[in-house]
Every structure is written in C-alpha cells, then in structure tokens.
Amino acid sequence: MRKKIEEEFSSLLPTLFDTDSNLRILDAGCGLGFLSYVCAITFPKSNVTGIDIFNSGSLSEASITKAAENMSLLGIGSRVHFAEHDLTTPIETEAKYDLVVSNLVFHNLGRSRFRGYEHVFNVLKRNGYFVIGDLFPHESSDSKYLTTWSSIVKEIQEEDSGRWRYKIKVLKKV
Ligand SMILES: C[S@@+](CC[C@H](N)C(=O)[O-])C[C@H]1O[C@@H](n2cnc3c(N)ncnc32)[C@H](O)[C@@H]1O
C-alpha cells in the first residue's frame, strides 16, 4: 500500500508544478517524513517543512530526531526540516506555502479535522495545492467543507484499501 501511495504521489506532483520550481512545501502530519522525502526528491530545488505532534500511538517510532536523521541519511537534510505542531491549532509561518501534502492524518482527528483543514488553507497560497491522501469515512461532509476553500482538481480512489477506501484528493485553493 505504501509503495503504491509513493508511486501515486510521485506521478501526481509533477503534474501540478514544474519539477524545477523552487517551492515552499508543507507536509502536514509528516511522521518520519515519508511524503517530505517524496516531495524533496520530486522538486529538487524546493524546501519542505514537516509538522507533526511526534507522539502519536499510530506511529510510535516517530520522533522529530529520527525524522531529521532519516532526511540527513537520504542526503536531503538541508532542504527538509521538521517542527512539532498540533494541526488542530493555527500554523505559524513566515510565508505561505505553494503546496501542502498529507497522508493518513486528518481522519484521526475526528471533528477537529475541520479546524485542521482550515489551518492548512490559511497557510496555503491562493492557487496553491493541497494534496491529501486519506480515508474519508464521512466523505460528503469533508467534500462539502473542502470545496468552501478549494476546487477539487482530481480524485484518485485506491481499490482494495479496506472499508473506507483510501483516496487522494488534489485541491486547488480558490
Ligand atoms: C499514520 S501516521 C502517517 C504519517 C505520515 N504522513 C506517513 O504517511 O508516513 C499519522 C501521523 O499523524 C500525526 N498526527 C496525529 N494527530 C496529529 C495532530 N493533531 N497534529 C499533527 N499531527 C498529528 C501522528 O503523529 C502520525 O505521525
């Protein structure tokens, strides 16, 4: 499943921006930096910030130090940085992001995910993209909320991914 998600993001992201672009990218709920890595490799001139609470049971091995060590070992430590942050609280940033990515995070947040979505859109540039891979157990309410901030450019549905199918949504901020 993870390999498939990596492949999907790797083929999707270059359709949104030129791979030569110098982008500001945010990985919301980055864990050990899975998507941070995919973004940094796809856009070699870009900088990535990964944020996470770094103490969730769902990824017990995750720690900010481990995530940073991983990126150094992969040779992208200078372009990928991590910060501890709870997505249910506003995100502080010096400048807005061109692209926000997220994988398997927001469904964990219950109704607070709507606040999380709002915080993401508040730090995303107009016409920037939010690419979210997640399970959407209450999809109609999520879609309704997400389309108050963005237009849905593309949706990719994974087959065989359980009761609530894994989906990648490409959202463009309006
Ligand atoms: C299933 S893991 C996915 C990690 C990573 N995106 C990946 O694909 O490997 C879910 C992540 O969401 C993070 N998380 C859960 N609640 C969070 C919150 N309120 N704010 C930020 N991160 C959160 C967890 O710490 C965990 O790293």
Image (spheres, rainbow, N blue to C red):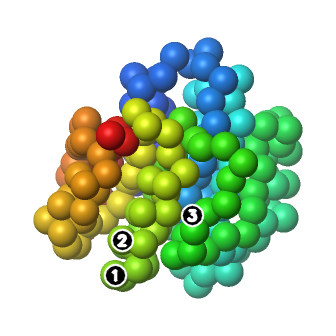
In the displayed structure, 8 sits above or below 17; it is below
Can residue 119 be seen by looking at this rendering?
Answer: yes
Q: Which residue is mark 3?
A: 29
- Are circles 2 and 1 on residues that touch, CB within 8 Å? yes
CB atoms at circles 2 and 3 under 8 Å apart? Answer: no
The three-letter code of the residue at mark 3 reads Gly
CB at disc 3 and ligand 1 closer than 8 Å = yes
Quadrant in the rendering for residue 92? bottom right
Comes first in the chain, label 1 or label 3: 3
Q: Which secondary structure, mark 2?
A: helix
Label 3, secondary structure: give it. Answer: loop
Q: Position of residue 110 (x, y in %)?
A: 36, 82
Please identify the quadrant where the C terminus is shown. Answer: top left
| Image x and y of residue 46, in percent | 68, 30
Q: Nearest the camera: 69 or 17?
A: 17
In this view, the residue in front, 138 or 118, is 118
Residue furthest out toward the left: 140
Residue, disc 1: 111
Seen at 57% across and 68% down, the residue is 90
Q: Is residue 84 left or right of residue 13?
A: right
Q: Is mark 2 within 8 Å of ligand 1?
A: no
Q: Quadrant of ligand 1?
A: bottom right
* Left or right of 28, for residue 167: left
User: Which residue bears the numbered disc 2?
Assistant: 114
Graded by Cα atoms within 10 Å as few (under 14), some (14 to 19) or many (20 or more), the crowding at tag 2 reads some
Q: How many marks?
A: 3
Q: Nearer the viewer, residue 68 or 3?
A: 68
Residue 68 in the image, given as x and y percentages of width and height: 81, 55
**Crowding near pointer 1: few (<14 within 10 Å), some, many (20+)?**
few
Residue lying at 46% horizontally and 68% vertically, measured from the top left: 116
**Residue 139 seen from this side:** no
